[in-house]
Image (cartoon, helix red, strand yellow):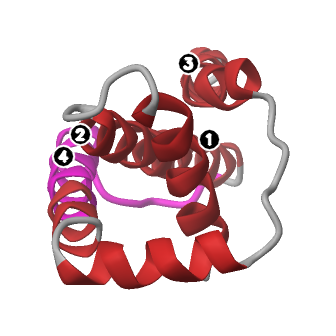
């Protein structure tokens, strides 16, 4: 199991007690938002680095279109992975392993911190 699988099931189990039917949707939205935020931060970092090195890269419009396509692919990939039989198999593996103690408020603030860091880097661009 990957780190994202562990984070997904940590959020899933935390919200399963409060929201029985929506726990999977909440965890799916969280893991997609986290991965998209990480792609955003890394893309802005690479764009800023290449601009400072005076390297000619793709235009800003094309980069935003590429980011939107990658975001869509990430969400569809997570939706396929964490619905149905694959989620049940991963959930069984997660329940057999040691329960990981993650701070839920820290986990939920992680995508916002990534976006904030990306916006700060984007300002120096």
Q: Do the residues under discs 2 and 3 have CB atoms within 8 angstroms?
A: no
Residue identified by numbered label 3: 119
Which image quarter holds the N terminus?
A: bottom right
Q: Do the residues under discs 4 and 3 have CB atoms within 8 angstroms?
A: no
Q: Is 65 within the magenta? A: yes
Specify few, some or many for label 4: CA neighbours under 10 Å numbering under 14, 14-19, or 20 or more: some
Give how far apart the Cα atoms at labels 4 and 1 are: 19 Å
Give how far apart the Cα atoms at labels 4 and 3 are: 16 Å
Label number found at residue 1 = none
Which structural element holds mark 3? helix
Residue toward you, 54 or 83: 83
Give how far apart the Cα atoms at labels 4 and 2 are: 21 Å
Label number found at residue 68 = 4
| N-terminal-most mark, 4 or 2 | 2
Q: Is residue 112 above or below residue 64?
A: above
Q: How many marks?
A: 4
Give how far apart the Cα atoms at labels 2 and 3 are: 27 Å
Q: Do the residues under discs 1 and 3 have CB atoms within 8 angstroms?
A: no
Of labels 1 and 3, the one closer to you: 3
Q: Residue at x 54, y 67 (%)?
A: 5
Which structural element holds mark 2? helix
Residue 125 left/right relative to 18 = right
Of labels 2 and 1, the one closer to you: 2
Which structural element holds mark 4? helix
Q: Position of residue 13 (x, y in %)?
A: 53, 44
Q: Do the residues under discs 4 and 2 have CB atoms within 8 angstroms?
A: no
Specify few, some or many for label 2: CA neighbours under 10 Å numbering under 14, 14-19, or 20 or more: some
Q: Position of residue 48 (x, y in %)?
A: 62, 41
Residue identified by numbered label 2: 25
Residue identified by numbered label 1: 48
């Amino acid at each position: 199991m990957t780190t994202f699988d562990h984070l997904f099931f940590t959020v899933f189990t935390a919200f399963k007690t409060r929201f029985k039917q929506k726990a999977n949707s909440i965890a799916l939205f969280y893991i997609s938002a986290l991965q998209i935020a990480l792609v955003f931060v890394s893309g802005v970092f690479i764009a800023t680095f290449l601009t400072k090195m005076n390297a000619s890269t793709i235009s800003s419009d094309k980069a935003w279109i590429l980011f939107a396509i990658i975001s869509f692919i990430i969400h569809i990939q997570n939706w396929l992975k964490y619905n149905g039989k694959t989620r049940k198999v991963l959930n069984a593996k997660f329940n057999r392993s040691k329960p990981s103690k993650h701070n839920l408020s820290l986990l939920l603030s992680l995508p916002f911190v990534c976006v904030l860091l990306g916006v700060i880097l984007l300002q120096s661009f």
